[in-house]
Amino acid sequence: MTDATTAGNAVLEVRDLDVAFGRHHVLKQVSLTVPQGRTLGLVGESGSGKSTLAKAVVGLVKPVGGRILLDGVDLTHTRRTVAVRRRVQMIPQDPYSSLNPRMTIGETLAEALDPRRASVKKHRPEIEALLNRVALDGEAAARYPQEFSGGQRQRIAVARALAVRPALIIADEVTSALDTSVQAEVLGVLRELRRELDLTMLFISHDLAVVRHVCDEVAVLQHGELVEVAARDELFTAPRHPYTRLLLDSVPDGGPLRTVA
């Protein structure tokens, strides 16, 4: 993240990453590091390349240049085995489409725990423990996604990500589809889990107020280029790049980030 951060304790390293779709260059020489037990916020207006970076890290987008390393292992051009894919878990933006409506919550979590031999009965203690970690009762395991609110579904998505004990969690706009009051519930759960489990997380958001609430460091993307990386308090109190200052000026009340021309 900063010059003081060494690669030795890095879970995720992105080095000079380039991603292009045809002639459209989406990410340009992006480099960042997420150390063990830290949360890096990635911010920028819509279209800046935030979600493309997340997709590249999980293997859904193929870079045209640069490297992606997880615990020092280069994944850029490596075949993503099931074991490797399970080490990086993404919590998606939409809590309404991310859970299978035909499966109970218990079945969803059992499948995450053991994809080959998923059994709610066999894994009931682990399932209940996961639900309790995200402030849900163990009885929720017998219910279907449509029986839960958006905030509850997002907490279930968090539990599913935790089930595989990943090295890295990518939270991609996880509160943007939720009402403000519900956002607080999800963010509270994430903060508590960070403390309890020493989670390492890449937290992507357009909402600077949310990023300030959750993250240790913040990286700023503009048109696919990384323009600033700083500790959270430093970035919010003394931003160095004009674009960062423009983003901060666009949210004087701490509300959601408006599109900046």
Image (cartoon, helix red, strand yellow):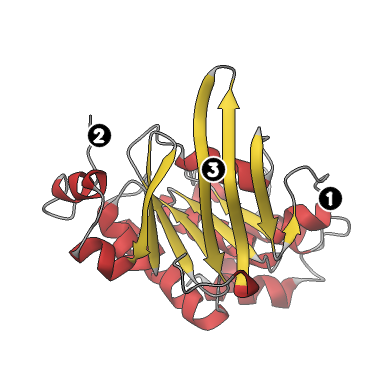
User: Residue 84: horizontal and vertical position, in percent?
Assistant: 78, 56
- Cα distance, mark 1 to mark 3? 20 Å
Q: Which mark is residue 216?
A: none
Mark 2 / mark 3, whichever is N-terminal: 3
Label tally: 3
Residue 156 shows in this picture: no
Q: Are marks 2 and 3 in contact (CB under 8 Å)?
A: no
Image marks 2 and 1: residues in contact by CB distance under 8 Å: no
Residue drawn 53% across the image and 37% down it: 52
Q: Position of residue 17 (x, y in %)?
A: 58, 42
Residue kind at label 3, given as amino acid type? Leu
- Packing grade of label 1 (10 A; few <14, some 14-19, many >=20) is few
Pointer 1: what residue?
81
Secondary structure type for disc 2: loop
Residue name at image x 16 percent, y 44 percent: 250
Inspect the image, locate mark 2, and give the three-letter code of the amino acid beneath it.
Thr
How many neighbours does mark 3 have within 10 angstroms: few (below 14), some (14-19), or many (20 or more)?
A: many
| Secondary structure state at the residue bearing disc 3 | helix
The residue sitting at the top extreme is 23
Q: Quadrant of the C terminus?
A: top left
Question: Label 1's element?
Answer: loop
Residue bearing mark 3: 53
Q: Earlier in the sequence, mark 1 or mark 3?
A: 3
Q: Amino acid at mark 1?
A: Thr
Q: Reply above or below: 26 against 200.
A: above
Q: Nearer the viewer, mark 1 or mark 3?
A: 3
